[in-house]
Amino acid sequence: MREVKKVVEMGASAQDELRLFLAELNTMKCIGQNEWVVVFDAAGPLYGGQLRAYNPQNLSVILHNVTCLRDGRRFPKVLVRGDIVKRIEWMPRSQYEKYVSDLLEAKAKAVGGGA
């Protein structure tokens, strides 16, 4: 009950943000299978993971077992807003794992000076 009270006592802008977030979750379509995808933004590959849900109206996606393809950080779940999604590529898990490891290895070499 305390959490509800916190939401009620939030400022108007925070309540608006929460309302928009909950409305977006209401339009999400859940995915039953383990679909491995890579989500691209304008700068290239952004996140990779299992696609769990998507919003067909604005292309927002929820990923599970996520790897940030910019720095290799891992997250249990990520919501990627549709306004930054430029492309979504599906691939089999074995191909996904090779793609992620090759990409992160190349980035590490580039940062380390090719060592």
Image (tube, grey):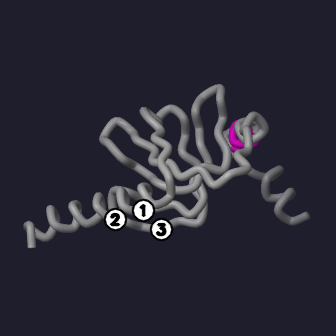
Is residue 21 magenta-colored?
A: yes
Q: CA distance from mark 1 to mark 3?
A: 13 Å
Which residue is at a point 9% across and 67% down the rendered structure image? 114
Q: Position of residue 84 (x, y in %)?
A: 46, 36
Q: Residue under circle 3?
A: 74
Q: Position of residue 13 (x, y in %)?
A: 66, 40
Q: Are marks 3 and 2 in contact (CB under 8 Å)?
A: no
Q: Quadrant of residue 100?
A: bottom left
Q: Residues within 10 Å of mark 1 (few under 14, many from 20)?
A: some
Give the secondary structure at mark 2.
helix
Decide if residue 103 is on the left or right side of residue 21. left
Q: Position of residue 33 (x, y in %)?
A: 68, 51
- Above-or-below relation of 81 to 2: above
Sequence-first disc among 1 and 3? 3
The magenta stretch is 18-22
- Above-or-below relation of 27 to 48: above
Q: Residue under circle 1?
A: 97
Instruction: Check disc 3 and give the amino acid type.
Output: Arg
Q: Are marks 1 and 2 in contact (CB under 8 Å)?
A: yes
> Looking at the image, which residue sits at the far top?
57
